[in-house]
Image (spheres, rainbow, N blue to C red):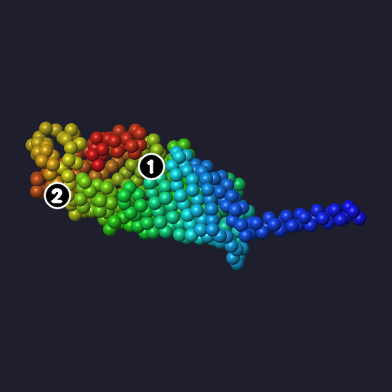
Amino acid sequence: MKLLVRLLTVAFLFLLLLIGALALCYFSTLPLERFLQYKVNEALPEIEVSSLKMDRQSFAPQSSLVLSGIKAEGRDGGGRAFEVSAEKVVVTDIFTLWDAQRKTHLSASGIEFEGFDVKATQAALEGDYQASGEQWRFAGPVTIERIYANGQAIKKIACRLEADQKAFKLTDLNMQLGTGRVSGEFMLEFGAKFPYYMDIALENIPTKQLNLQDHLDGILNGRLKVRGDQHSFSEIEGKLKAPAGVMMNARLLSPLLSYIPQSTQKKQIESIIAQNKTIFVDVFALELHSRKANFLKTQFDIESKEYNLDVNLGVDINTDGGIQALLNSDIFSHL
C-alpha cells in the first residue's frame, strides 16, 4: 500500500512538472527565444546571434505560431555588429517543422535591419521553409521599402529569394534608384572565397546616385555582368552610356593621357585638364570585357563637339586582386 502511495505521489509530481513546463512554454517566450537563437546560429555559422528577444507569442488556427516584436543582435566573423527586428512572424502549421518531407509556410512583416554600413526599413518576406538536420532551404518573394547605403537611398526593392546553408540567390530583382531603376539578379555562395555572380541593368540612373557627381553630371544607362570571388574575377562584361550626353570634369581624362600618343588632340586634352574645366560631352560610353584571366579590356568613347574632342581608346587593366585591384587601377582610381 505504501509503495502504491509513493508511485501515485511521484506520478502526481511528474504531472505537475509537465504541466508547469508546458505552461512555461505557452506563456513565456524564453524557451522559444533560446531555441530560435540556437537554430539560427546552427544554420548560419558565419554569424553569431548574441541576443534574441520577443514581446509575445501566441497560437492561431491551423496550428499557426504568431511571434510579435522580435529583436536580435549579433556579429559577423569579422566582428561587425548588426541588429535585426520584425514586427510580426507567422509560422503556419508548426508541426511541419519537425517533418523533413514537408514545407512550413513562413511570413514576416515590419522587418528592420542595421549593420555592415547598411540600413533596411519596412521589409517583408513570405515563402516556404524546409529543414532536415543541418540542411535547410527558404524560397519566396521579398520586398523592402528602403535601403540606405553609402549615403544613398534605394527604394521599392522587390525580388525572389532562394536561400540555403550553402548560398543565397536573388532573382527578378527590381528597385528604384533616384529617378531610375535597377533590375537583374545576384547570387552569393558561402565559403572561404565567397564566389558570386551578378547581372545588373541600369535604366536612367542619375550620376549622383552612383556617387559620380564630382566627375559626371547626367543620366546613365548600362548593364554589368560579373562572376568571381573576393580575390579575383573570372568574367566581366559591361556597358555604360549617357544617352543624352553628360557634363564631365576634364580631370576624368587625366588617366587616359598616358595611353594617347603625342598629337594635337593630346595637347588639347592637356589644356582642358589644366584649366580644370567641366565640359559637355555629346557621347560618353564605356565598355568592359574580360579578355583573359586577371585582365580586363576597357573601351572609352568620348566626344565633345564644343571642344572638337574625339577620344576612342582601349586600355587593358590587371585585375589580379579582384574588385579592389580594379578600383585602385590608374583608370578608375580617379572616380
Identity of the amino acid at label 2? Answer: Phe
* Quadrant of the rendering where the C terminus is positioned: top left
**Residue at image coords 25%, 51%:** 208
Residue 321's x, y, as percent?
35, 34
Residue 285's x, y, as percent?
22, 47
Residue 256's x, y, as percent?
19, 37
The number of discs equals: 2
Q: Is residue 108 visible?
A: no
Identity of the amino acid at label 1? Answer: Arg
Mark closer to the observer (1, 2):
2
Helix, strand or loop at mark 2: strand
* Quadrant of the rendering where the N terminus is positioned: bottom right
Q: Nearer the viewer, residue 119 or 272?
A: 119
Helix, strand or loop at mark 1: strand
Disc 1: which residue: 227
Tell whether label 2 touches label 1 (CB within 8 Å). Answer: no
Q: Please indicate whether residue 135 sits to the left or right of residue 117 in the image.
A: right
Disc 2: which residue: 280
The Cα–Cα distance between marks 1 and 2, rounded to whole angstroms, is 34 Å
Q: Label 1: how many residues lie within 10 Å, few (<14), some (14-19) or many (20+)?
A: some
**Residue at image coords 66%, 59%:** 23
Q: Residue furthest left?
A: 264
Q: Is residue 88 visible?
A: yes
Q: Nearer the viewer, residue 223 or 192?
A: 192
Residue 233's x, y, as percent?
36, 38
Q: Nearer the viewer, residue 102 or 145?
A: 145
> Within the image, what quadrant is residue 293 found in?
top left
> Within the image, what quadrant is residue 252 found in?
top left
In the displayed structure, 56 sits above or below 335; it is below
**Residue at image coords 11%, 38%:** 274
